[in-house]
């Protein structure tokens, strides 16, 4: 369906694509892989008309095409689901789903809102987005916003559908639902380009794999001829360690965080506890309450009843600043773009913002040289590369929290960076005695790191795997036990 011939694209100081050629066929799911900075997103934006190539040509069904804008791509039945959440916060769910197709619903110069809403509801049902169609998108979780974007992509009627990290915020259940939809589209002859850092998904869903590295085409192969190690080797030129990480020594460690009958607008009597140096995993479907629990702990969602105890003493946490400054609790958000970083500012500012109050002088002034030294320390702390997620994690490591809540730690990062982040989390718990709450939709990540897992469903804890620090279970065994908790 689509052929790319010798496409190159440069930005100031970097060549993002260097004479890349490949093709995508109708009725196939084609995985496009590579580390961060390999050129995947640049290539996708060229296919969608967002960027113009410096060199090379695109052919659609054998005919050369020139795409000057995203609307040109839509007109040629090409659509994209972006990796970064791109929604209009104050607009409704239905309006966001139909945002790039409003012309369809014009009648005598006015938008037929009833017809727009009715059609949007059909796509909401397809992705099982169970919220009112009139809800403002700003009120949704990051995962729900992702489902809005997927519904928008499906609603375009595309013959070429580009999915850039579509499952980055989704759990296994939502991901499996998406894969069922993709199989149906494949049967209808749609060409699907699937970008993901979750190689288990790539092996499960794709027909073909193409790898980019440093802006260059490395190779293509049918998925059935590949395994995980072969793909990783193509991507980064080496294999990564995914072995069992071992057990944590928690014997006689004190309880550092406890909730007793926690009650607020989300929870009605939620109780749990964590030991010093423990990695506790929170697993559940979109909207199950994992992130809401984290934000209740750090004071973003007020507690109306019950107790939060830190080191055995009842506390009242009124804000994120309270959580950090008084109780040394940090929170790495799942939504780094909207909540985690100041994108317009420097890496140094973003890394050191959590310690400004600690290092300000008596007049409230900061020492820029000290900030730079602290940021450099973090960059040298296995966090090189300037990746947004690494910066988001680094600022909380720098804050030296005793309890760190990490929500989707490896969302949108490549396999090499993911290994680095996992090693860092494990080291913080094992070697430094930090207490970690790990919220993740990535099952292998959860199994690799968590030594106890609580399963959330409808804002309740419906199951607990409390023996992961005593016995090594296989991926299949742990996945099956977690699935049984939802029954």
Image (tube, rainbow, N blue to C red):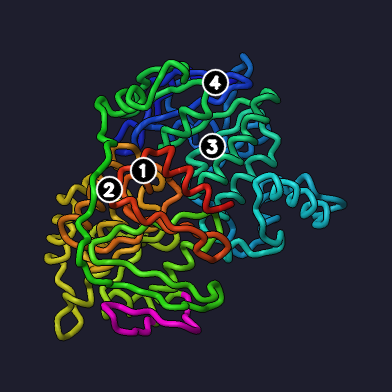
Q: Which residue is mark 4?
A: 24
> Which callout, 2 or 1, points to the residue nearer the camera?
2
Are the residues tagged 2 and 1 within 8 Å (C-beta)? Answer: yes
The mark nearer the N terminus, 1 or 3, is 3
Answer with left or right where residue 103 lies relative to residue 374: right
Q: Is residue 336 visible?
A: no
Look at the picture and state if 445 lies above or below 10.
below
What secondary structure is found at the residue carrying circle 1?
Answer: loop
Q: Distance from label 3 to label 2 (Cα)?
A: 24 Å
Question: For the residue carrying disc 2, how many other residues have a C-alpha within 10 Å: few (<14), some (14-19), or many (20+)?
Answer: many
The mark nearer the N terminus, 4 or 2, is 4
Q: Distance from label 4 to label 1 (Cα)?
A: 24 Å
- Coordinates of residue 55 in the picture (x, y in percent): 43, 23
Q: Residue at x 37, y 84 (%)?
A: 316
Q: Which residue is mark 2?
A: 421
- Coordinates of residue 461 in the picture (x, y in percent): 49, 63
What secondary structure is found at the residue carrying circle 4?
Answer: strand
Looking at the rendered structure, which numbered label has been put on residue 163?
3
The mark nearer the N terminus, 2 or 1, is 1
Nearest the viewer among 222 and 12 is 222
Q: Which residue is mark 1?
A: 413
* Magenta region includes residue 37: no
- Coordinates of residue 128 in the picture (x, y in percent): 66, 50
Q: Distance from label 2 to label 1 (Cα)?
A: 9 Å
**What span is colored magenta in the figure?**
301-317
The mark nearer the N terminus, 4 or 1, is 4
Answer with left or right where residue 106 lies relative to residue 400: right
């Amino acid at each position: 369906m689509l052929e790319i011939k010798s496409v190159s694209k440069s930005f100031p100081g970097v060549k993002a694509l260097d004479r890349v050629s490949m093709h995508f066929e109708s009725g196939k799911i084609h995985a496009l892989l590579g580390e961060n900075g390999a050129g995947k997103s640049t290539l996708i934006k060229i296919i969608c008309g967002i960027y113009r190539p410096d060199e090379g040509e695109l052919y659609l069904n054998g005919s050369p095409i020139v795409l000057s804008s995203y609307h040109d791509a839509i007109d040629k039945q090409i659509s994209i689901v972006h990796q970064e959440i791109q929604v209009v916060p104050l607009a409704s769910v239905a309006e966001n789903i139909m945002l790039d197709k409003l012309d369809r619903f014009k009648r005598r110069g006015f938008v037929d809102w009833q017809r727009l809403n009715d059609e949007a509801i059909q796509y909401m049902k397809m992705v099982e987005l169970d919220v009112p169609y009139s809800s403002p998108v700003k009120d949704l979780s990051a995962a729900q916003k992702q489902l809005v974007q997927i519904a928008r992509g499906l609603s375009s009627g595309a013959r070429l559908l580009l999915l850039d990290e579509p499952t980055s915020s989704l759990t296994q259940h939502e991901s499996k639902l998406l894969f069922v939809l993709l199989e149906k589209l494949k049967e209808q002859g749609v060409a699907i380009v699937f970008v993901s850092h979750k190689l288990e998904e790539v092996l499960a869903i794709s027909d073909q794999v193409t790898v980019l590295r440093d802006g260059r085409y490395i190779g293509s192969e049918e998925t059935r001829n590949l395994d995980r190690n072969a793909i990783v080797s193509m991507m980064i030129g080496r294999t990564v360690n995914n072995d069992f990480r071992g057990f944590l020594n928690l014997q006689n460690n004190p309880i550092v965080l406890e909730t007793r009958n926690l009650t607020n607008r989300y929870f009605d009597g939620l109780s749990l506890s964590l030991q010093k140096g423990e990695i506790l995993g929170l697993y559940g479907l979109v909207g199950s309450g994992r992130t809401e629990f984290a934000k209740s702990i750090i004071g973003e969602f007020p507690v109306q009843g019950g107790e939060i105890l830190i080191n055995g003493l009842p506390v009242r946490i009124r804000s994120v600043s309270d959580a950090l400054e008084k109780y040394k609790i940090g929170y790495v958000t799942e939504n780094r773009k909207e909540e985690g970083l100041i994108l317009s500012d420097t890496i140094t500012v973003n890394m050191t913002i959590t310690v400004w109050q600690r290092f300000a002088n008596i007049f409230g002034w900061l020492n820029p040289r000290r900030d730079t030294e602290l940021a450099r320390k973090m960059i040298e702390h296995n966090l090189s590369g300037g990746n947004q997620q690494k910066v988001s994690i680094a600022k909380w490591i720098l804050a030296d929290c005793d309890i760190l809540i990490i929500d989707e730690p490896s969302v949108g990062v490549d396999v090499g960076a993911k290994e680095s982040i996992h090693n860092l989390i494990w080291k913080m718990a094992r070697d430094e005695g930090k207490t970690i709450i790990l919220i993740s939709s990535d099952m292998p990540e959860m199994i690799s790191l968590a030594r106890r897992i609580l399963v959330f469903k409808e804002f309740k804890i419906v199951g607990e795997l409390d023996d992961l620090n005593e016995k090594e279970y296989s991926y299949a065994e742990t996945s099956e036990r977690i699935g049984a908790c939802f029954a």
